């Protein structure tokens, strides 16, 4: 998701704001050098204009001016501590500072809030996204192979977005909970009438609260979510604490042929196979299904990915009953 409109927040100076938009007009016409000149004048007028600094960094990068781009992105980061533009990620991509920083909540929220209205169409029509369908098939294979029917009492859709995974799994769950950081995405999910409970918050905070309330889920799905998480270990450990006995975690993640973590040019994270497997197994969740598969394309080319299903060994038993998480009203 790299084609969102530039995030704009007024500098408080009307002339600087006008110059910023003038620069974007030049950029739209392909005049990168002219846009850079106007933005340089803009930040002289408004030295703390984060949007202008970020746009200047982006244009300098396109012009091959790496040092100039780094300087501009640093000023954008300093002018906007929540880093809603993702300047820290751009600096990492350019080899300056921390190589694999965590994405700030403000950046992820703004990114998806901007994208929400066209998310479904963009993913399915332009990026050939099929993550939920692939995850459904993987979970079905694991359950049927264990002699269990494909039915769950309670499912948690982590990073539920607009509800694409919820749509795929709703027919086989009694109680469906979705959580996402973006209010606009959650609003889209709510409009589909799929979820019994929707929460707008960060994943780690939500999982910690659910664990404290002794909530238990029989299926946790994270479709195309971990590409925005730099370290999988904390989140897989938190998921393990809310899984019911015999519960299952199913997720997709982008990958690469090397080891460890890699920040891609798309500003998404790719996790090496050993890193992903280690995060799951160290959380006490043995891998039950592991497949290399592309769940989306980027510029027409398949994106390397992994499809993983993991869970306590009890998944192989014929445990009866799938209670709804503690504290949640029982479905009708």
Image: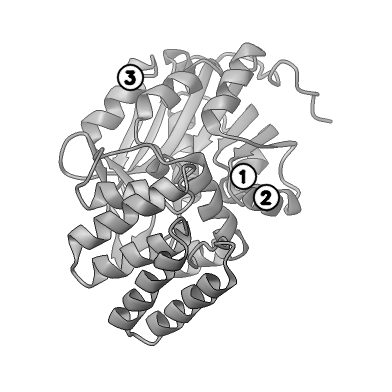
Mark count: 3
Residue behind mark 3? 281
- x and y percent of residue 120 in the render? 56, 61
Residue found at x 54% / y 63%: 8
Element on which disc 1 rests: helix
Residue behind mark 1? 166
Q: Earlier in the sequence, mark 2 or mark 1?
A: 1
Contact? badges 2 and 1 (CB < 8 Å): yes
Q: Earlier in the sequence, mark 1 or mark 3?
A: 1
Residue found at x 66% / y 19%: 322
Residue found at x 62% / y 12%: 212
- x and y percent of residue 167 in the render? 63, 49
Query: How dense is the environment of label 2, judged by Cα within 10 Å: few (below 14), some, or many (20 and up)?
Result: many
Q: Which mark is residue 194?
A: none
Residue behind mark 2? 189
Query: How dense is the environment of label 1, judged by Cα within 10 Å: few (below 14), some, or many (20 and up)?
Result: many
Q: Earlier in the sequence, mark 3 or mark 2?
A: 2
The answer to whether 205 is drawn above or below residue 241 in the figure is below
- Which is in the foreground here, disc 3 or disc 2? 2
Depth check: 240 or 294 in front? 240
User: In the rendered view of the protein, which quadrant contains the C terminus?
Assistant: top right
From this viewpoint, is residue 294 visible?
no
Element on which disc 3 rests: helix
Element on which disc 2 rests: helix
């Amino acid at each position: 998701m790299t084609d969102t409109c530039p995030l704009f927040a007024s500098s408080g100076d009307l002339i600087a704001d006008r110059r910023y938009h003038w620069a974007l007009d030049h950029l739209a016409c392909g005049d990168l050098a002219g846009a850079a000149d106007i933005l340089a004048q803009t930040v002289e007028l408004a030295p703390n204009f984060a949007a202008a600094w970020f746009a200047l960094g982006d244009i300098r990068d396109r012009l091959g001016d790496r040092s100039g781009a780094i300087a501009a992105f640093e000023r954008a980061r300093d002018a906007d501590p929540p880093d809603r533009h993702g300047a820290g990620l751009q600096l990492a991509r350019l080899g300056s500072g921390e190589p694999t920083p965590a994405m700030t909540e403000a950046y992820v929220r703004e990114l998806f809030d901007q994208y929400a209205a066209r998310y479904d169409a963009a993913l399915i029509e332009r990026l050939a996204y099929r993550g939920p369908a692939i995850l459904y098939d993987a979970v079905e294979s694991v359950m049927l192979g264990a002699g269990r029917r494909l039915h769950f009492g309670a499912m948690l859709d982590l990073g539920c977005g607009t509800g694409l995974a919820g749509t795929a799994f709703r027919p086989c769950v009694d109680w469906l909970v979705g959580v996402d950081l973006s209010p606009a995405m959650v609003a889209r999910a709510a409009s589909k009438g799929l979820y019994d409970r929707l929460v707008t918050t960060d994943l780690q905070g939500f999982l910690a609260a659910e664990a404290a309330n002794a909530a238990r889920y029989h299926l946790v799905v994270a479709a195309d979510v971990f590409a925005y998480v730099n370290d999988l270990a904390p989140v897989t450990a938190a998921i393990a604490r809310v899984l019911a006995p015999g519960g299952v975690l199913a997720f997709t993640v982008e990958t690469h042929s090397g080891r460890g973590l890699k920040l891609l040019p798309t500003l998404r994270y790719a996790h090496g196979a050993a890193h992903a497997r280690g995060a799951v197994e160290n959380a006490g969740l043995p891998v039950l299904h592991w497949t290399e598969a592309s769940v989306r394309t980027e510029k027409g080319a398949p994106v390397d990915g992994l499809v993983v299903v993991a869970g306590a060994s009890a998944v192989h038993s014929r445990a009866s009953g799938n209670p709804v998480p503690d504290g949640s009203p029982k479905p009708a």
